[in-house]
Image (tube, helix red, strand yellow):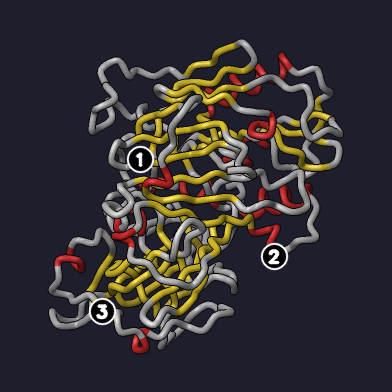
């Protein structure tokens, strides 16, 4: 029990990926759809790491994330802070900013909204490898006025020194990191593996002049890919028809990780045989993509959560109860955090159906481990039951090797926020349709997608 409580106070690793771009420009309104490459952080920064080191690093990097996301203050509608832990295994996104375009690198996060980068003059900033962005050198940089609707309706903490002054923003993160600066609009250019680069004009961004916290030197800021009003995804909405998808290549088992892929617009449509779709539930904060978890099947034993969803329908705009929308899907958290009630049932069922010798996790992180020298041992099949969608997982989605002799269940208990992590999403094409308000899953060999 003590180890279970310990896990609830830590978060688990987020996949760190880098979006690779080329140089030609192409306006977003002309792009029916496009795709970009996603590369796991460990394969780029530490190509000599073996698969066990990658897993260990990935687990250790996100020890703060679940704890931060689960804090009660995150659910306050009055809180404008986006509670993430910067540069602890999020995405690193390479893109160009301004005109002429200046290439930069920032943490891309599906759990936050505002895109911001460090700008000149930087009064007190964290160290970064790239030069600070100079807004005076960009012809498309436009400060947001205090008298504008954007300043008053950005759903951020904003302040003004007068109606004619620039609109100031302030974001505070759960690990006491923060960014303060000017709100502005600017052109962002993304790369594409399927066509010329895509230029997105008039994106609301933050130009940070006072930034501190646990940011790494590779990042210049954060790119928000959540569901909130000022996120990059939301601002791209009509041009990508509210659609984006990703296909995550397993980041362990191979010394070299092949690129994953993230797609937008027409390229992000998930269709064909084997697709399972579940509704996105409208809850606060809008940043998160909330789904409804109904239960899990271990082997032939179905284990259900006690949910009362009888009064709701797939077309409801609001949840019928607090039990609907009881889990978020997050490509930036490694493990899956289950409601404690369900987690205890899953642990018991796995123990009853697994014939391997149980051992303690050599890393001291996970609760249920078995002695096994194989990457895939004889473990029970696990199926996750979302509302309207049964997602049958493979052993690589449910068990992870934490040493040469230990194979551990990749689930953890969460009394607060439940999270469907990226291990469970590997080798699935995961598509978000924000117009239809659905998330779809399709079993896919992502190394060939």
Q: Give the CA separation, mark 2 to mark 3.
A: 35 Å
Q: Residues within 10 Å of mark 1 (few under 14, many from 20)?
A: many
Whole-percent x and y of residue 59? 66, 48
419 versus 394 height, above or below: below
Q: Nearer the viewer, mark 2 or mark 1?
A: 1
Q: Residue under circle 3?
A: 142
Please state the total of marks drawn on the protein image: 3
Task: Using residue 66 as the reference point, say whether residue 290 is left or right of it.
Answer: left
Left or right: 66 in relation to 230: right
Horizontally, is 180 left or right of 36 in the view? left
Q: Earlier in the sequence, mark 2 or mark 1?
A: 2
Splitting the image into 4 quarters, where does residue 145 fall?
A: bottom left
Distance from disc 3 to disc 1, alpha carbons, whole Å, reads 31 Å
Q: Give the structural element (helix, strand or loop) at label 2.
A: helix
The reply to whether residue 142 is visible in this rendering is yes
Circle on res. 433: 1
Residue tagged by mark 2? 45
Quarter holding the C terminus is top right
The percent coordinates of residue 8 (x first, y second) are: 57, 40
- Observer-nearest of 262 and 346: 262
Q: Is residue 40 above or below residue 217?
A: above
The mark that comes first in sequence, 2 or 3, is 2
Residue occupying image coordinates x 58% and y 45%: 248
Q: Which residue is at 64% across, 59% downward?
A: 41
Q: Which mark is residue 449?
A: none
Q: Secondary structure at mark 3?
A: strand
Q: Earlier in the sequence, mark 3 or mark 1?
A: 3
Say which residue appears at 45% left-offset and 60% top-offset. 195
Q: Is residue 375 above or below residue 172?
A: above
């Amino acid at each position: 029990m003590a180890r279970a409580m310990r896990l609830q106070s830590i978060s688990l690793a987020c996949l760190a990926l880098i979006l690779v771009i080329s140089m030609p420009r192409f306006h977003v309104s002309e792009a029916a759809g496009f795709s970009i490459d996603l590369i796991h952080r460990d394969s780029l920064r530490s190509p000599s790491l073996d698969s066990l080191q990658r897993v260990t690093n990935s687990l250790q990097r996100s020890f703060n994330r679940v704890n931060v996301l689960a804090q009660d203050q995150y659910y306050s509608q009055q809180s404008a802070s986006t509670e993430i832990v910067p540069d602890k295994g999020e995405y690193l996104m390479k893109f160009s900013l301004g005109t002429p375009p200046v290439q930069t690198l920032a943490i891309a996060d599906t759990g936050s909204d505002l895109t911001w980068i460090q700008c000149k003059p930087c009064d007190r900033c964290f160290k970064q490898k790239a030069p600070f962005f100079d807004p005076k050198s960009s012809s498309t940089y436009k400060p947001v006025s205090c008298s504008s609707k954007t300043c008053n309706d950005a759903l951020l903490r904003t302040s003004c020194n007068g109606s004619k002054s620039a609109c100031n923003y302030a974001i505070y993160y759960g690990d006491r990191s923060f960014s303060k600066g000017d709100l502005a609009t600017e052109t962002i250019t993304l790369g594409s593996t399927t066509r010329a680069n895509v230029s997105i004009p008039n994106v609301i961004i933050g130009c940070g002049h006072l930034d501190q916290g646990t940011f790494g030197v590779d990042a210049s800021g954060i790119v928000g890919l959540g569901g909130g009003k000022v996120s990059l995804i939301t601002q791209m909405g009509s041009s990508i028809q509210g659609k984006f998808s990703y296909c995550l290549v397993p980041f362990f088992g191979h010394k070299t990780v092949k690129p994953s892929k993230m797609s937008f617009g027409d390229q992000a449509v998930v269709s064909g045989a084997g697709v399972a779709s579940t509704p996105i539930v409208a809850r606060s904060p809008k940043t998160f993509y909330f789904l409804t978890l109904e239960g899990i099947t271990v082997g032939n034993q179905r284990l259900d959560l006690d949910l009362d969803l009888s009064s709701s329908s797939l077309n409801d705009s609001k949840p019928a109860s607090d039990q609907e929308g009881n889990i978020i899907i997050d490509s930036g958290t490694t493990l899956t955090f289950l409601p404690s009630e369900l987690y205890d049932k899953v642990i018991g069922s796995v123990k009853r159906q697994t014939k391997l010798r149980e051992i303690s996790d050599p890393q001291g992180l996970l609760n249920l481990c078995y002695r096994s020298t194989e990457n895939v041992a004889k473990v029970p099949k696990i199926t996750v039951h979302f509302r309207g969608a049964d997602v049958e997982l493979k052993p690589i989605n449910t068990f992870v090797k934490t040493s040469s002799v230990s194979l551990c269940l990749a689930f953890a208990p969460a009394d607060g926020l439940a999270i469907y992590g990226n291990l469970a999403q590997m080798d699935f094409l995961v598509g978000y349709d924000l117009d239809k308000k659905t998330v779809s899953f399709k079993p896919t060999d992502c190394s060939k997608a």
